[in-house]
Image: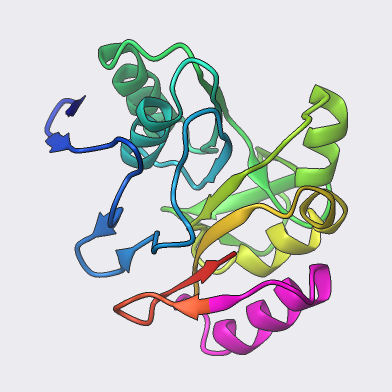
Amino acid sequence: MGMFQGNFWSFCFPIFPKVRHLFWPLDGEYDNEKTYLRSGDGVFDIGACMGVFSCLAGLATGEEGRVYAFEPLKEWASLLRMNIALNNLHNVTVVEKALGDSPGTVRMEGITIVDGAGDIPVTTIDTFVREKGIERIDFLKMDVEGFERKVLLGGKESLSRFKPRMGICIYHLPDDPEVLRRIILDINPNYRIEKNSTGKKFLVY
């Protein structure tokens, strides 16, 4: 069993040999029998918030795994680091940046990225992979309030190369299911795409 701790969160999860039903109360699970976290995986948690998924991923992937937790908001990144420390995880790296389709800066209102330049740094999956010498992405989780399509477009090279399993939220924009499906299949036409039990996430493998 793995214990997730925080200032007002406390969960126990059975996490081996795989995390089953990574469940958010309204959004549903990130996994099925094909998409799940495995020991040794390289994981991108895009939109990590306070780190529930990041900590689960760190526990599930073990000492040989590596989790990159992308969280641009300082208050959430602070809680994220706290929860990583409380869980004694040494395989989770916090990246205090947003991801998009091109490097730059953005402005945020609450947890939502809005039009116009701001003070929050943005990179792309492809840029990050090149700069950090990332050699594998096995699992990608993404919940970025409607920015999902831009993140995918900014990672086409890496996602085509690594072909990660993915759990992606598809409910923020009305045309998300259609647009995100098209981008995913353009990246890799052999991907299988299923909706989760709530219909609010794509499970991709």
- Pinpoint residue 190: horizontal percent, then vertical percent: 75, 74
At 52% from the left and 81% from the top, the residue drawn is 173
Q: Please state which of residues 22 and 113 is positioned toward the viewer in this rendering.
A: 22
Q: Is residue 81 left or right of residue 70?
A: left
Quadrant of the rendered image containing residue 79:
top left
Above-or-below relation of 38 to 169: above
84 relative to 136, above or below: above
Residue 155 or residue 195, whichever sits in front: 195
Q: Is residue 21 above or below residue 201?
A: above
Q: Is residue 104 visible?
A: no
Q: Which residues are magenta?
A: 171-193
Label tally: 0
What residue appears at the point 77 percent right and 29 percent down from the top-left corner? 134
- Image quarter in which the C terminus is found: bottom right
What residue sits 39% from the left and 64% below the top?
32
Residue 62 is inside the magenta segment: no
